[in-house]
Image (cartoon, rainbow, N blue to C red):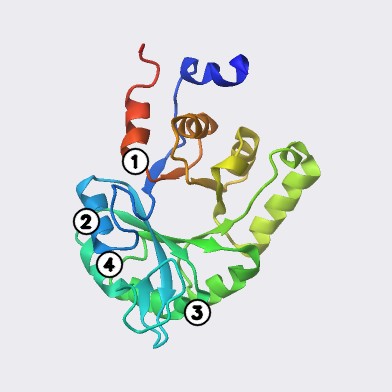
Amino acid sequence: MYAFTKSYDERTLSFTKGFTITAHAGAFNTSPNSLETVNAAIEHGVDILEVDIRQRPDGTVVMGHDIITTNNDGVEVTLLFETVKPAKIKLNLDIKDTRSLPMLHDLIFEYGLEKRVFLTGIESFQANTAAEKCPGIDYYINYSPSRFKIFSEDYQEKLLGMLEETGGIGINCNHAYASKTLCDMLHDHGYKLSVWTADKKYHIKRMLIIKPDNITTRQVELLQSIIDNWGKKK
């Protein structure tokens, strides 16, 4: 256990080129999928904000995690896009309902945000839908890779084959499934690794050592503090 945990702070911290921090929906003690969260993320200067995407029964695309049952639920994505357009922040659009993709696609391009958004929440069996209904927008594949099987060449080939077949830019997984072996394998083949949702200090440190392309967290300030104070004597 000493060898497994003590070595984190003793290692030199470095980052994958283009490394980003994503504020999870509801970060900064705000209500998830609200304009309050959006404004807080902009004010704190985060790289990326994650929001959940659904649609109302009438087809209006909104921010929302749970099933939308009325035409009054959720904040309209048009308000989200109007708020972020003048800022530099990027958006991780976590797709909870693929029916929203055609209208979402049109809005993304209408607001000129095609270079500032990407999709998550896309399972491998939904990849064709994402590619067809939201063309021109990058998407990660949600996957739960095995931290044991990842050492097998056959398993690695399976993951790479899945990414090639689905057209995903990489894997988006819970931090518990991420490993240095997985990350290195993806990077060696031109793919990315995004991990969620690392909120505890130990989990954040383990993710930093793995060197993914993105870490999603509710504790943005804690993550930044860990980075700023890495290697300093307590």
Residue name at image x 29 percent, y 49 percent? 29
Mark 3 crowdedness (10 Å alpha carbons): few <14, some 14-19, many ≥20: some
Gap between marks 2 and 1 measured at Cα = 15 Å
Identity of the amino acid at label 1?
A: Val
Mark 1 crowdedness (10 Å alpha carbons): few <14, some 14-19, many ≥20: many
Question: Which of marks 1 and 2 precedes in the sequence?
Answer: 2
233 up-or-down from 227: above or below:
above
Identity of the amino acid at label 4?
A: Leu
44 up-or-down from 211: above or below:
below
Q: Nearer the viewer, residue 119 or 30?
A: 30
Q: Nearer the viewer, residue 109 or 215?
A: 215
Tell us which disc is closer to us: 1 or 4: 1
Mark 2 crowdedness (10 Å alpha carbons): few <14, some 14-19, many ≥20: some
Question: Which of marks 3 and 4 precedes in the sequence?
Answer: 4
Q: Residue furthest top?
A: 233
207 up-or-down from 143: above or below:
above
Disc 4 target residue: 80
- Could you say whether the residue bearing mark 4 is in a helix, strand or loop? helix
Disc 1 target residue: 220
From the image, which quarter does the C terminus lie in? Answer: top left
Disc 2 target residue: 39
Question: Which of marks 2 and 3 precedes in the sequence?
Answer: 2
Question: Which of marks 4 and 1 precedes in the sequence?
Answer: 4
Identity of the amino acid at label 2?
A: Asn
Q: Nearer the viewer, residue 3 or 191?
A: 3
Q: Label 3 near label 4: C-beta < 8 Å?
A: no
Numbered tag placed on residue 99 in the rendering: 3
- Could you say whether the residue bearing mark 2 is in a helix, strand or loop? helix
Identity of the amino acid at label 3?
A: Arg
